[in-house]
Image: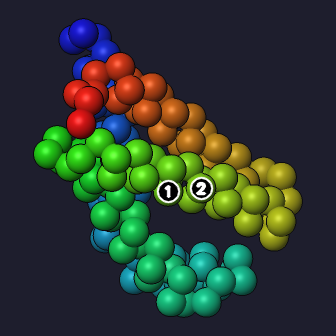
Amino acid sequence: MKKNQIFFWISTGVIFLFEGVMPAFTSQTELAKEGIRHLGYPAYFGNALVVFKVLGALALVIPKIPNRLKEWAYAGFAFDFIFASISHWAIDGFGFQAMFPLFVFGILVVSYVFYSKIKIID
């Protein structure tokens, strides 16, 4: 059981840093704004995305959040990573920018698998 919790918290911590902390601190930089523009999305989409990323990351790490809400956060991040990969692939072609979201998606899958093993039924 302890091994499951360790794997869960490490993988979830990485997701929390990548999808909660980093966007919260970097979303208003010129580089982040240009990244959203480069992919063809309007500026408000980037702002909404950051809000939902931070809320989703918090939902994953706060133990008192109901399991059903955590499941929605996992689903939201899965869509986020898959569509980020598709967006980069469509604009920039196959490369690091298109593959990196799938790598983080893999970390999310690890987090979800170990979350499923340790969760307490609602």
Q: Which mark is residue 49?
A: none
Nearer to us in this view, 92 or 52: 52
| Circles 1 and 2: CB atoms closer than 8 Å | yes
Q: In the rendered view, would you say 38 is above or below 103?
A: below
Q: Residue furthest left?
A: 64
Query: In the structure shown, which secondary structural element does the residue marked by tag 2 occupy?
Result: helix
For label 1, the crowd category at 10 Å Cα-Cα, with few meaning under 14, some 14 to 19 and many 20 or more, is some
Q: Residue at x 56, y 42 (%)?
A: 105
Q: Is residue 1 visible?
A: yes
Residue type beneath disc 2: Phe
For disc 2, the marked residue is 79
Give the labeled residue for mark 1: 76
Label 1 is placed on what type of residue? Gly
Question: Considering the image in quadrants, where does the N terminus appear?
Answer: top left
The residue lying at 57 percent from left, 59 percent from top is 80
Q: Secondary structure at mark 1?
A: helix
- Residue 97 seen anywhere in this rendered image of the structure: no
Instruction: Give residue 58's quadrant in the image.
Output: bottom left
Numbered circles on residues, count? 2
Note whether 74 is above or below 89 in the view shown.
above
Q: Position of residue 88 (x, y in %)?
A: 73, 63
Front position in the image: 5 or 89: 5
Q: Is residue 109 above or below residue 24?
A: above
Image coords of residue 4 (percent x, y) = 31, 16
